[in-house]
Amino acid sequence: MRKFASSSPVSVGVLLVVAGFIALFLAWNGAADKDFIQGQFPYLFSGGLVGLALVGSGLTVINVQARRADQAELLNRLEALLETRNAEITEAVAQPTRPTRRRKAS
């Protein structure tokens, strides 16, 4: 269940990108039927800009989720490193060493 929860934003991002490309295709197809500029503008504004916005939003969602996953992995590695360091320190403190005698300089 946890794996699905972490991959669902990526799925939503991919869905937004696909919807954006579909909107761009429909805008292009609708504008291609008109042979005068005034007839193509509604398709450009409604489909083209919406399609670009959907593609940009989808890519942003994917990028944010990838950064979150990288940050979570880095945090897990740092916690493991800290646990290892703390275990080594605890082990070193638990095993007392003999004090070494310092030799006097002659």
Image (tube, helix red, strand yellow):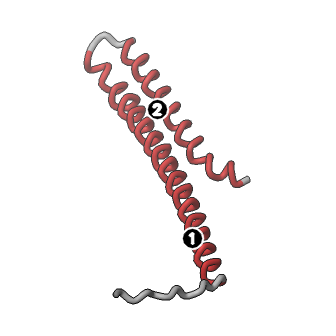
Q: Earlier in the sequence, mark 1 or mark 2?
A: 2
Which residue is situated farthest in the left direction here?
Answer: 37
The image shows residue 80 at horizontal and vertical percentages of 60, 64
- Lateral position of residue 92 relative to residue 27, left or right: right
Q: Position of residue 89 (x, y in %)?
A: 58, 77
**Is residue 80 rendered to the left or right of residue 50?**
right
Q: Tell me which residue sits at (38%, 32%) in the image.
A: 46
Dot 2, how many residues are within 10 Å of its Cα: few (below 14), some (14-19), or many (20+)? many
Residue nearest the observer in this picture, 86 or 17: 86
The answer to which image quadrant residue 48 occupies is top left
Query: Is residue 96 or residue 58 the one in the foreground?
Result: 96
Determine which residue is flagged by label 1.
Answer: 85
Q: Determine which residue is flagged by label 2.
A: 20
Q: Nearer the viewer, mark 1 or mark 2?
A: 1
In x, y percent, where is residue 37? 26, 17
- Please name the amino acid that badge 2 sits on: Gly
Q: Residue at x 31, y 10 (%)?
A: 35
Residue sitting at 47 percent across and 27 percent down? 21
Q: Residue at x 55, y 88 (%)?
A: 99
* SS under mark 1: helix
Residue 8 at x, y percent in the picture: 62, 47
